[in-house]
Image: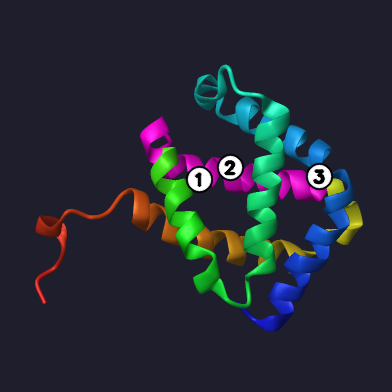
Amino acid sequence: MTPEQIAHVQDSFRRIQPMSDTVATVLYADLFTHSPKLKPMFTGLDMAHQGQQLMRAIGHVVANLSTPQAIWPMARTVAVHHAKCGVNPGDYDVFGTGLLRTLDRALGDAFTPEAKTAWIEAYSMLVGVMIKAAYPVPHYYQAAE
């Protein structure tokens, strides 16, 4: 990511932090609306606490975009946990789209095209690592070197 993209993501995240509980609630509502099959994975969980964990995780990623190697251990751990819970690679697309919709709702005009592009870049980078960690390609599918 470019320094400008990192600045866009960090600035927009700072703007939503005061309303992070609401943002998390809206994001999960969006996720369950667009992918109802995921809702049972959250049965019995305290969604307020889950939302706080989500926003802390996003905050960790946002704070470390300049040094992504600081993000990867947490990202890999979360990804493996998600896979064990039944999350599929395609579910990351649904979540990412919901994240963008939620940011657009929360930020309004402050969610500029540049900010949106920066969030897409950050999320794509993160998800690439997460999917690789949670769904490794078996060695017999890897190309011969």
Image quadrant in which you'd find residue 137: bottom left
Q: Residue at x 66, y 54 (%)?
A: 58
Indicate left or right for 139 with 31 as reference.
left
Which span is picked out in magenta?
A: 83-105
Q: Are marks 1 and 3 in contact (CB under 8 Å)?
A: no
Camera-side residue of 16 and 94: 16
The image's mark for residue 20 is: 3
SS state under label 1: helix
Camera-side residue of 43 and 27: 43
- Work out which quarter of the rendered image holds the C terminus and state it: bottom left
- Residue 88 part of the magenta-drawn span: yes
Indicate left or right for 110 with 115 as reference.
right
Is 78 drawn above or below residue 85 in the view shown? below
- Name the amino acid type tagged 3: Ser
- Name the amino acid type tagged 1: Tyr
Measured Cα–Cα span from mark 1 to mark 3: 20 Å
Q: Are marks 2 and 1 in contact (CB under 8 Å)?
A: yes
Image quadrant in which you'd find residue 140: bottom left
Q: Residue at x 55, y 29 (%)?
A: 35
Residue ID for mark 2 = 95
Tell me where residue 60 appears, x and y as whole percent.
Answer: 65, 59
